[in-house]
Image: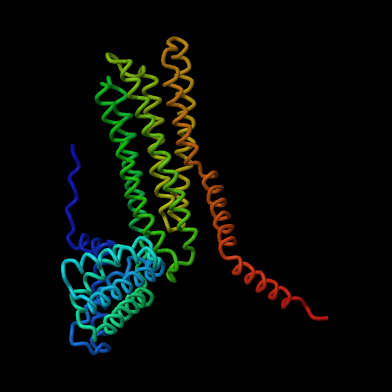
Amino acid sequence: MPVPLAPKDPLRDLVRRHREPAVVQTVRSTAAAVISYVVALQLVSSEAPPLTAPLTALLVVQVTLYSTLTTGIRRVNSVVAGVVIAIGFSALVGLTWWSLGLVILASLVIGRFVRVGEFVPEVAISAMLVLGVAQVTSTAWDRVLETLIGAVVGLAFNVLLVPPVWVSSASEAIVDLAGRMRKLLGHIGDELAEHTPVEQAAARLHEARRLDHDIVQVDAALRQAEDSLRFNPRVKEGLLSRLVLRTGLDALEICAVVLRVSCRTLTDLAKTRTDEPLFPPEITSALQELFGHLAGAIESFAVLITTQVSANAEHAEARLTAELAAGRESRDRVAHLLLDRLRQDPGQWQLHGALLAEADRVLDELDVEKRSERLVEELDRHSREQQARYPWLERLKRRVRNSVIRGDEPED
């Protein structure tokens, strides 16, 4: 009997949408643009509306504080360069079709030399927008002032009102990815008990390949979460949180690749057994048990890396350890059964061995102890990179540490 779907809660759905990065970014950008426009009205004496200020604020305000601080300067450079180019052309020739073309050409060329990075097109965009409202030479400095006002307001807006931390959205994406992998493993296990046509096995292979697209989306959400943890005063252990999620997604990505290869192996087996099940009943039962434990381990692993509460994390780790132990027992049982089968029919030993190797790779990738070792290695690597990038900071820390040690020594 199908389980009835739970009724939708409009209030809960509204609250969830309010927490989405796109919604929050829209509200914050609008507020920053309006504030910059109001400030520009008070400080700029030009008769024309100070639209350059909200334009700059829209470009500067980002969804995370880290992206605002790292890209804000380049965006300000791109806008200022565009404004200056537009003012120069406005004073010399005005707005015509050929001057517009020269403005765009000059903006794209100059943008390569003012170190704005990927924001070169914004130099031309700013120049075109300003060219339509800055055709009076006397208002040239007003446009520059408006640009600075918008930049300052945009930067101050994200510094004083720090954007939210987007870890929850990335965690949900990781859990959803693990859920799709678990569902695929469940489908594969259910279909082993019956004759598997090549078309059906190929359909599962295409489903496994679609996981690559899902991983790309999860990676984008995780990059946004990582940026939201950097330079954020609300976060105490931002580096550790970033590494836990990043290494966890790397492990799931490898598991997705292995799962795709397993589907490829089963598809090849289906091509050789067109009139019978892929495996005898006892091997099918053992493989279903193995796939079930792999699915449970993947799901528990996703819960473990996305759980913030220590009690829930301990429960998830215990469940993951149990699933891995049971999975290894099932794997050994499948290996013995396949070995007996291959003694009778050694024709498919390569594919059978591939299935065992792929199961071993998933179990090894999700191992709790190896995951802890990976985190320690990543922390050490990050520490070495920081020392190499900022040697002066390391020297300062060493001096402070030595001074504290000398201060604690007892006097004679």
Quarter residue 273 falls in: top left
At 31% from the left edge and 31% from the top edge, which residue is drawn?
A: 205
Going by the image, does 313 lie left or right of 105?
A: right
Quick one: 237 or 94, which is closer to the camera? 94
Quadrant housing the C terminus? bottom right
Residue 31, can we see it? no
x and y, in percent, of residue 90 in the image: 22, 77
Quick one: 33 or 343, which is closer to the camera? 33
Quick one: 97 or 259, which is closer to the camera? 97
Quadrant housing the N terminus? top left
x and y, in percent, of residue 197 in the image: 26, 21
Going by the image, does 330 lie left or right of 72?
A: right
**Would you place residue 379 above or below residue 47 in this image?**
above
Number of dots carrying numbers:
0
Return the residue found at the far top.
344
x and y, in percent, of residue 162 in the image: 37, 72
At 47% from the left edge and 38% from the top edge, which residue is drawn?
A: 324
Quick one: 196 or 314, which is closer to the camera? 196
